[in-house]
Image (cartoon, grey):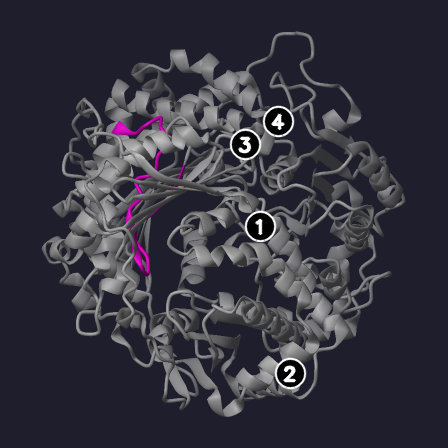
């Protein structure tokens, strides 16, 4: 069950329950105790009552401006400057697919589409164009979503100007009461929604529907999936959409949230002026009755079979949901419960790493269902064919926790993780991201929890933590598990389960007869890799002043590049690049270093991966080590306090990799699951085969056969990477909130202390040769999904990205092509929900790159889609792009480029290679200028050069059932 389907599910009740202001508290397990009379902690205003925090003893974030208009519309405003000079808007309507009648199934989602298709003040087809002209990209900055009980509209404004804020509020007001829902526009949108429905018709969705139908019998859930039915989408008249709109798109069901770099008082005045006159039309719709689960239902089982599905097991149980206000006492109790639940998940994760384990991963989750039920689930992804063993393991580990409880070491590990997460949240309070805060406020719209500052969460945690002994956590968990309904076991498998549900139920019952022993205490070892020798000496130190980058070389030739930033308080990114990577593979041995990508799973000589999870509990550390095109290593997000330990861990993976058999065994359990889905959908089969086709069937770019990768082992990998690990050039990048000297000292004591390395990366010229497909004949790939599902892609060979101006022009050209494809395939023909185009220009393989256009379509529309793509390419060749189209392609790109410069991840791309690829630093300096300078004539010239029909390679993916 996912959060998008069941409001505030297990993800909101994660081990980090007190981490951030967005954390929702737990769902009640018992009737609330009567609170003693005391002075109010929170304001007693109408807004506080509307947002349901007036009576709580949990103090609300005082920086948030909460409001409610006389018409019932709620709003919340928060000034926040990360990202700088931007604004996030969210508008939530408390209505989703639950409100649909039988002849309206899918119309809540259809209505979401119609919000972009005409209103009183914005003609059909103009809303997206209006936003593109102001720098918003469709999809990235302009989007919406429909769930069972809510519909949310999203605008991410690239700047906080009055004009853009006014535009955003105007569009939200149009959505709220002024949609035209023109019958002709409705008819034009049907094909787009059918395309979206077709694309979402996957084995995962079918499994979810089966799961909901099995677990929630008696409820309108499985038959109210938001994508609806094909018949309704094809035939429902506009009047049935209008019916939903008038009854449910009303101010009393609306919540507007704005977070960003603005003056809340000024924006509040704008909201009042814009929305005060909004009134509902006609009678208001009632809250839909969705039924409830049968708590007296006997134990039952279900199986779902599909060749592409992961083998998995779940055991779910329910109890009635009890309404309970958010209080300090509730949060303290929920903390104890969550610690227990997290320990069960931790035990399953530990078991998953055993060499002979029947599972790949396991979990314990907690979900609330629409204020109807409270659900707990224990589950696991199973080794293929091992559902029976996995089911027994999950059942017995849950029962072990109930019968024998937890050890103090287990509790302490979870508390350490929470304490560190809270400390980091408090340290980063001034650089919390606006998107996350806005989404948290939307979650709080129903009044189920009080939105607090991280300091408050930390204080509540520290007040409760001393009482959380192993006995206390055990008691809370046991109480949490009491009174649940009989278990519902479910198995998903690639092959039919012999005996079906009866066999599953029998296996569950047999497992319950197996006695479980108490857990054993396990002592944690100290981290073994604390010293790497005498810290290295700096032999070269220079600054690139205009980019704020410092470049250092140690005596052993290790390169260190540093850029300090204030973008995210107390967060630091560390990148390690060790010469080698996938370039060590050859045409004769294309999987030579494939296992290096999973080296982390092999642990260290002194510690398994599971050992590291315990040793590093309470630390902001990531056990990261893998490979990329030309390097081994990886990047990790850490804190200034833990930066030195993160460096030691990454150095240990380089100098003392574990090559443990349990890691290899896990890889071999995972691979069959991954490969089984490689031809399940058009996108999957394209992902499997396109790389090799484009690279002229170079085996290094092909997906290797399963039997080949299953035969790989650590013994084969060791000699392949030995020279790189012992002698290869090393380059380290550091970006974030850390003092330069602290970073230097940590790297000097680890990588700087290693024996001498080669001074430069091997260019490996021969290994960098890639050739675009010489055979341009059309290719047809076969997937095993529904007959009507197809995808068409057209590729044109281009170039690498070494010429910055041309690379930026090609990017602009592809963005213009995408806008044209959207207009033609989506808006005019109604054939595709999400056509796309892009430029892929290599920075690793000289001369290699391509432009492409793609669209997911109905099988019967392949020919018209193909013709449309080539017609657009011809139009781009034959005449210059008009000024408006270029503006709509360019402005969102420029806004994204400007915004990205305030992100650590943007700078890490440059800092990570600031010594070995110093020439690429100019891209940061000149990229925006190159986009601004591009002209229609230059783009047309590139279209004439590259978008040539006889150079194109057409690849389509069709079903094995198509045409039958």
Is residue 693 shown left or right of residue 956? Answer: left
Question: Gap between marks 2 and 3, in whole Å?
Answer: 50 Å
Foreground of the two, 417 or 13: 417
Q: Nearer the viewer, mark 2 or mark 3?
A: 2
Q: Which residues are magenta?
A: 615-637
Q: Is residue 268 above or below residue 33?
A: below
Residue 526 in the image, given as x and y percentages of width and height? 21, 24
- Residue tagged by mark 2? 876
- Residue tagged by mark 1? 900
Question: Gap between marks 2 and 4, in whole Å?
Answer: 54 Å
Q: Nearer the viewer, mark 1 or mark 3?
A: 1
Q: Nearer the viewer, mark 2 or mark 4?
A: 2
**If you read the primary sequence from the N terminus, does the residue marked by circle 2 or circle 4 appear first?**
4
**Residue located 74% across and 50% down the image:** 248
Residue 110 in the image, given as x and y percentages of width and height? 66, 63
Q: Mark on residue 24? A: 3
């Amino acid at each position: 069950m996912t959060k998008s389907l069941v409001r505030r599910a297990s993800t909101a009740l994660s081990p980090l329950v007190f981490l951030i202001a967005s954390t929702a508290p737990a769902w009640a397990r018992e009737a609330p105790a009567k609170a003693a009379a005391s002075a109010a902690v929170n304001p007693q205003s109408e807004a506080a009552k509307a947002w349901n925090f007036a009576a709580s003893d949990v103090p609300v974030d005082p920086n948030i401006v909460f409001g409610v208009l006389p018409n019932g519309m709620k709003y919340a405003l928060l000034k926040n400057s990360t990202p700088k000079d931007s604004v996030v808007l969210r508008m939530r309507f408390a209505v989703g697919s639950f409100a649909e009648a039988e002849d309206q199934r899918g119309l809540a989602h259809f209505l979401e589409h119609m919000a972009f298709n005409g209103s009183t003040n914005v003609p059909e087809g103009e809303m997206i164009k209006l936003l593109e002209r102001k720098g918003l990209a469709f999809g990235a900055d302009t989007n919406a979503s429909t769930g069972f009980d809510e519909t949310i509209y999203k605008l991410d404004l690239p700047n906080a100007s009055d004009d853009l804020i006014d535009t955003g509020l105007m569009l939200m007001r149009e959505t709220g009461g002024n949609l035209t829902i023109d019958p002709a526009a409705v008819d034009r949108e049907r094909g787009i929604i059918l395309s979206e429905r077709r694309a979402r018709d996957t084995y995962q969705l079918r499994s979810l529907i089966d799961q909901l139908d099995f677990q929630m019998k008696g409820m309108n859930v499985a038959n109210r999936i938001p994508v609806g039915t094909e018949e309704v989408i094809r035939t429902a008249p506009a009047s049935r959409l209008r019916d939903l709109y008038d009854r449910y798109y009303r101010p009393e069901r609306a919540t507007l949230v704005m977070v960003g770099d603005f003056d809340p008082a000024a924006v509040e005045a704008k909201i009042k002026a814009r929305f005060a006159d909004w009134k509902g039309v006609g009678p208001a719709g009632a809250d839909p009755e969705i039924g409830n689960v049968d708590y007296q239902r006997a134990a039952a089982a279900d199986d779902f079979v599909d060749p592409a599905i992961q083998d998995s097991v779940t055991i779910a149980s329910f109890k009635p949901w009890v309404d309970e206000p958010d209080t300090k006492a509730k949060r303290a109790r929920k903390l104890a419960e969550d610690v227990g639940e997290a320990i069960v998940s931790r035990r399953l994760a530990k078991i998953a790493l055993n060499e002979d384990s029947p599972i790949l991963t396991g979990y314990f989750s907690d979900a609330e269902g629409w204020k109807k039920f409270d659900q707990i689930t224990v589950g696991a992804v199973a080794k293929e064919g091992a559902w029976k063993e996995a089911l027994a393991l999950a059942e017995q580990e849950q029962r072990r926790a109930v019968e024998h409880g937890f050890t103090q070491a287990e509790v302490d590990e979870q508390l350490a993780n929470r304490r560190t997460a809270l400390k980091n949240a408090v340290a980063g309070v001034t650089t919390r991201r606006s998107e996350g805060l806005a989404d948290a406020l939307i979650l709080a719209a129903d009044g189920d929890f009080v939105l607090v500052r991280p300091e408050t969460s930390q204080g509540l945690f520290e007040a409760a933590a001393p009482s959380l002994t192993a006995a206390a956590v055990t008691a809370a968990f046991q109480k949490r598990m009491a009174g649940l309904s009989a278990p519902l076991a479910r198995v998903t498998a690639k092959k039919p389960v012999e005996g079906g549900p009866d066999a599953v139920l029998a296996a569950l019952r047999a497992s319950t007869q197996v006695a479980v022993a108490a857990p054993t205490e396990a002592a944690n070892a100290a981290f073994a890799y604390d010293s790497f020798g005498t810290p290295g000496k700096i032999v070269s130190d220079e600054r690139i002043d205009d980019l704020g980058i410092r470049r250092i070389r140690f005596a052993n030739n290790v390169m260190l590049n540093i850029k300090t930033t204030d973008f995210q308080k107390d967060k630091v990114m560390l990148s390690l690049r060790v010469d080698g990577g996938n370039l060590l593979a050859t045409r004769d041995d294309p999987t030579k270093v494939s296992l290096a990508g999973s080296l982390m799973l092999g642990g260290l000589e002194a510690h398994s991966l599971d050992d590291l999870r315990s040793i590093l509990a309470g630390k902001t550390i990531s056990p990261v080590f893998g490979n990329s095109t030309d390097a081994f290593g990886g990047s990790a997000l850490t804190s200034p306090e833990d930066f030195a330990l993160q460096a030691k861990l990454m150095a240990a993976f380089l100098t003392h990799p574990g090559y443990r058999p349990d890691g290899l065994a896990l890889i071999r359990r995972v691979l069959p699951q991954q490969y089984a889905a490689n031809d399940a959908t058009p996108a999957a089969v394209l992902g499997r085969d396109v790389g090799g086709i484009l690279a002229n069937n170079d085996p290094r770019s092909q997906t290797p056969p399963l039997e080949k990768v299953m035969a790989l082992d650590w013994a084969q990998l060791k000699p392949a990477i030995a020279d790189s690990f012992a002698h290869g050039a090393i380059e380290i990048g550091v970006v974030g909130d850390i003092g330069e000297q602290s970073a230097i000292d940590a790297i000097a004591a680890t990588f700087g202390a290693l024996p001498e390395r080669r001074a430069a990366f091997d260019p490996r010229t021969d290994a960098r040769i890639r050739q675009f497909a010489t055979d341009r004949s059309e290719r047809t790939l076969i997937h095993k999904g529904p007959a009507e599902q197809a995808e068409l892609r057209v590729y044109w060979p281009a170039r690498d990205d070494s010429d910055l101006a041309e690379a930026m022009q090609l990017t602009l050209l592809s963005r213009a092509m995408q806008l044209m494809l959207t207009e033609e395939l989506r808006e005019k023909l109604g054939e595709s929900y999400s056509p796309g185009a892009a430029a892929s220009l290599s920075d690793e393989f000289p001369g290699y790159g391509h432009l492409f256009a793609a669209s997911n379509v109905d099988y019967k529309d392949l020919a018209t889609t193909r013709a449309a793509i080539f017609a657009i390419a011809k139009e781009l060749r034959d005449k210059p792009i008009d000024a408006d189209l270029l503006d709509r392609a360019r402005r969102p790109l420029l806004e994204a480029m400007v915004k990205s410069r305030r992100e650590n991840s943007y700078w890490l791309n440059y800092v990570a290679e600031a010594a070995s690829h110093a020439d690429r630093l100019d891209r940061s300096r000149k990229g925006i200028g190159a986009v601004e300078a591009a002209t229609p004539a230059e783009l047309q010239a590139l279209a004439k050069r590259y978008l040539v029909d006889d150079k194109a390679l057409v690849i389509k993916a069709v079903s094995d059932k198509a045409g039958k």
